[in-house]
Image (tube, rainbow, N blue to C red):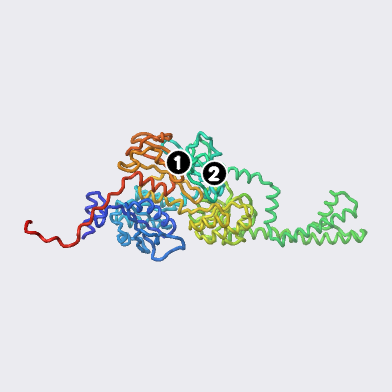
Amino acid sequence: MAEPLRERARRATGWRLRVNGETHPHYVVCGSDPLAYWVVRALLATELDSGRARITLVVPERRRSDGPDGRDVPGLHVVRADRLDEATFRRAGLTGADGLALLHQDDVGNMHAALCAQEVEPRLRLVVRMFNTSLANGLRQLFPDSAVLSDASMAAPAFVAAALGEVAPTHFRHGGRTLYVARRADVREKDVVCGVADTRDAARPRLLPADESTADVVLAEATGQPPGTELAARRLVRARRRRRPVAVLLRAVRSFATRKIGIAVLVLLAVIAALGWLNARAAHVGWADALYLTLVTTLTGEDPDIAKPVAAQVMQVVLNLAGLALIPLITAVVVDGIVNARLALHTGRIQPARSGHVVVVGLGNIGTRVMAQLNDFGVEVVAIDKDPEARGASLAHRLGVPMVVGDAGREETLRSASVETCQALVVVSTDDDVNLRAALNARGLTPDLRVVLRLFDGDFAERVQKAFGIGISRSVSYLAAPSFAAALLDRAVIATIPVGRHALLVTEVQVVAGSPLDGSPLSAVAQPGAVRLLAHARPGQKADWSADPRLVITAGDRLTVVARRAGLTALLRETTPPAPEPPPAAPTGPPPPRTSEE
């Protein structure tokens, strides 16, 4: 009867009662892929270091992928269960918990788990990972206070921008200003708010450098100009339209038939041209009459004339025979082209050669988003996936995006997508081995090809960058994890700025009375390479974007900052008072004997 009594007390008081008198907030994370790993790491860095929270991770009994899923991270309570139901949530201590993150890649399964969790803890804060927009909207209606996020939607713009050679199109509105990330050369100096990163060395970008003038990527105020990604896409489309039509026609003709048939047709045409020239020399006629006689003799034949010289008669017979062979060959070319086109529709082989396009490998959640955004920009896309029924296959068919079905790690598959002449290769499948092989084989075909590579293992990605010179590698989970963690902690992350494999967070932090920053000057907030102050606001006042660094911070002030994860964690400790020390433990021995005076 303990559970119903606790439940009735909680409903009556509106308080969240914690088990065994626990005073620290409790968060439950359910997931089995790198997103769960990075969310847990973000929570650990933010909360557990200060001893203010505890985290329970629910994972399947067996690993479902080779990537990390968080179960081996120290400092967690791990619950193993293959089904997310009421019993599992009660084992995980969901009753009285402050937040639940459902991070599996199964939209319907996450919705079912959310309904089960509501039965255990109705006042729970939910953070749910969703890909399908319709299901996400339905879940928001069922749980108005929940946060329904899509890691694919968050990370796709960064991949699109990298494919086009631009910075990620991050833009947000805060404090009455609309800000966006751009290259310093693309904005006016008076519109620059602060320097973000120095990316001239792609392998080792410097984030939030002490000297802001060295940053080539800046945060600027919007002035009505289109973002860099859109401009890059427009330039790419215009360049494709300016292609030489003759070269395009020749490539189309070359790819229409097989090589053997093409060689046979060319040899036969050469024989006809040679004999036609000899015939014209023998008849002593001009080039126009010679062309006419050759075509008529080849295609329709000519009445025999025994009065002609023997050489003319021989050339006439050979031309007639060539004409008999030419008609079937033309028929074979047409039939072969039609058959190849039909096979391409069924097997995904792309016959026509292309140039200036973007090749996207992997039509999962992120690949589908990248393909759709590039198509919206008007950029020609060719997709590759080993599964003809991949998640994004139906969308590719509706958008008219050619899809090659095959192993992207094989050179033949990459050639089918015309990787040699593409603008960029975006490799975003869920298999690190296939991704790396595809990137290396593509670089073997085109050494200067721009490659946007998705790798789950951060250390592995760093080593790949150093060893093979592939300077652009991104992790969807790493880019999206800060937003999921902030939503679980009920903290507002205003924006996430991806820079290479790193992520900068734009957030607003409130200073609490008794914290280390209470009474300190504003200059104490900024930490080169970790934290940069954007704006300061007194309680009830608007944000000041050019506050005096000597201004003294008081309790209740709001600080808008752009920071790295570690820098934000350190800032949160500086803006909150230290946790109270636990009371001394009561003695456990027997009570002392009473004296006569007592």
Q: Secondary structure at mark 1?
A: strand
Question: Residue 205's x, y, as percent?
Answer: 52, 48
Quadrant of the snapshot with the C terminus = bottom left
Front residue (pair 99, 382): 99
Q: Amino acid at mark 1?
A: Phe
Q: Residue at x 20, y 57 (%)?
A: 586
Q: Nearer the viewer, residue 460 or 540?
A: 460
Residue 373 in percent (x, y) is at: 52, 48
Q: CA distance from mark 2 to mark 1?
A: 16 Å
Q: Is residue 399 visible?
A: yes
The answer to whether residue 405 is seen in the rendering is no
Q: Element under label 2?
A: helix
Label 1 neighbourhood size at 10 Å, few (<14), some (14-19), many (20+)? some
> According to the image, label 1 marks what residue?
172
Quadrant placement of the N terminus: bottom left
Q: Decide: is 516 above or below 105.
A: above
Q: Which mark is residue 229?
A: 2
Q: Position of residue 496 (x, y in %)?
A: 45, 46
Question: Where does the image place residue 511, in percent across and percent down from the top left?
Answer: 34, 41
Give the residue type that dot 2 points to.
Thr
